[in-house]
Amino acid sequence: MSEQDFKGLVQVYTGDGKGKTTAALGQALRACAQGLRVVFIQFLKTQPGGEHFFADKYRPFEIIQFGKGDLFKKGEDQLLSETRQAYDCAVNALTGGKYDLVVLDEIFIAHWRGFLSLAQIMDLLKMKPPNVELILTGRKAPQEVVKQADLVTEMLMIKHPFSEGVHQRKGIEY
Ligand code: ATP
Ligand code: MG
C-alpha cells in the first residue's frame, strides 16, 4: 500500500468487559495480513500470552513487552521504569517510519496507576504521523483522549466468568 493511500486514525478500546486486547490483536492480525507493518507494545504486562508465540512465528508482527517477572510482586519504581521504557519505545515506533500500525496495549492502565501522565498520552496523539494508525487500549480511557480519538469502542461487561470463580484460562485469557 502506498503511503499516500493510507489515512491513519486513532482508535480506543476501553471499558470493563473482556475484549480490548483481543480486539487490538485481531485488528493487528488483519493489518499484518494486508501488508501493513505492525508493532504491538504492551504496557505493564510481563507474561507471554498466546499472541507472543504467534508473533514469534509470523513476522512481521512484532510484540514488545518490557520487564520480566510477576507484575504483582514488583515495586512501584520498577513499574515506573518499565513504563518509561515502553513509552520511549512507543515514541520511536510512532515517529520512526518503520510501522503503519502501532498498538499501545494497556496504556490507560499505566496512566491510571500513575506511571504515565495524561500530557504524555496526548503528546503521542500529536506526534502521530498522518499515515500511521494508532490503537490505545485499557480500562479507564481519559475523557480527553476519547474526545480526540476518531474511533472509540467501550467493552460493556454484561457477564464475566471471573465472578463465578473461573480463573484465567490458557488460550482464552492468555
Ligand atoms: P482480553 O485480553 O481477553 O481481550 P481485555 O484486554 O478486555 O481482555 P483487561 O482489562 O486487559 O481485559 O483484563 C485483563 C484480564 O482480565 C484478561 O485476561 C481478561 O480476560 C480479564 N477480564 C476482562 N474483563 C474482566 C472482568 N470484567 N472481570 C474480570 N476479569 C476480566
Ligand atoms: Mg487488555
Image (cartoon, rainbow, N blue to C red):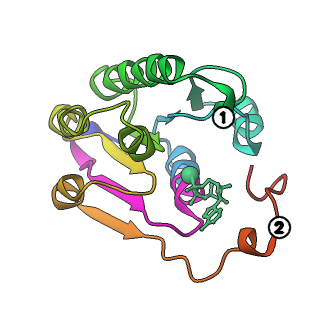
- The stretch in magenta equals 4-26
Q: On the image, which quarter does residue 47 sit in?
A: top right
The residue sitting at 71% across, 35% down in the picture is 52
The residue sitting at 36% across, 18% down in the picture is 88
Instruction: Name which of mark 2 and mark 1 comes first in the sequence.
Output: 1
- Magenta stretch contains residue 24: yes
Q: Secondary structure at mark 1?
A: helix
Q: What amino acid type is highlighted by mark number 1?
A: Phe
Q: Is ligand 1 less than 8 Å from the beta carbon at label 2?
A: no
Q: On the image, which quarter does residue 115 sit in?
A: top left
Residue 142 image point, x, y percent: 27, 54
The label nearer to you, 2 versus 1, is 1
- Image disc number at residue 166: 2
Comparing 109 with 53, the one in front is: 109
The residue sitting at 57% across, 27% down in the picture is 64
Q: CA distance from mark 2 to mark 1?
A: 20 Å
Residue 110 image point, x, y percent: 42, 38
Q: Secondary structure at mark 2?
A: loop
- Magenta stretch contains residue 17: yes
The residue sitting at 32% across, 65% down in the picture is 152
Indicate whether 80 appears above or below 123.
Answer: above
Q: What amino acid type is highlighted by mark number 2?
A: Val
- Image disc number at residue 72: 1
Indicate whether 137 appears above or below 64.
Answer: below
